[in-house]
Image: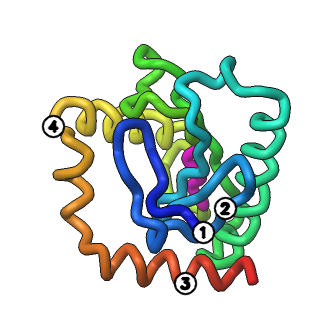
Amino acid sequence: MSTEFYSFGPYKIDPKEVFYSSPLSYAMVNLRPVVPVKRFADLTVEETQDLWLTAQKIGGRLECFHKASSLTFTIQDGPKAGQTVPHVHIHILPRKDGDFERNDEIYDEIDVKENELKEKLNLDKERKDRSLEEMCKEAEEYRSLFV
């Protein structure tokens, strides 16, 4: 984490919010490993491998940390798929028994949240809802999973 900041689409991410990084991907406290490419099809073979291996590693640790029993990995690839930040990223969602009445309701909830985000969002404004201190504390907890 020797970078001044990380880029997430047009947004800057403080390195203190990042809890894991590889040469081609990183994960920040809102659980999104990313690489600076707009669409999934634009990734190189190496970036695709690194992104999914990073997601696998992070997912396993977060599943244990959150005492979950499963994981949902999602990518919204392009605006019509609900992508609100023009940047390839994977949402990693630890899952527990009964978190949704029907398992696939999680996708409806993701769509609702993405649409709300798109309608009201200036990401920089939205990110201020959590203080840097709160985000750094969470990142520090997750960072300890990778030492």
Would you name the residue on which mark 2 appears?
A: 21
**Mark found first going from the N terminus, 4 or 2:** 2
Depicted 82 relative to depicted 122: above or below: above
Q: Quadrant of residue 14?
A: bottom left
Q: Nearest to the eye among marks 2 and 3: give it.
A: 2
Asked if marks 3 and 1 touch (Cβ < 8 Å), the reply is no
**Residue found 52% across the figure and 66% down from its top:** 18
In primary-sequence order, the first of circles 4 and 1 is 1
- Distance, label 3 to label 1, CA atoms, is 16 Å
Name the residue tied to disc 1.
1
Three-letter amino acid code at the position of disc 4: Lys
Query: Circle 4 is placed at which residue position?
Result: 120
Mark 1 or mark 2, whichever is nearer to me:
1
Pointer 3 residue: 141
Q: Is residue 123 left or right of residue 94?
A: left
Label 1 to label 2: alpha-carbon separation: 7 Å
Q: In the figure, residue 85 lies in which quadrant? A: top left
Q: Are marks 1 and 2 in contact (CB under 8 Å)?
A: yes
Q: Secondary structure at mark 3?
A: helix
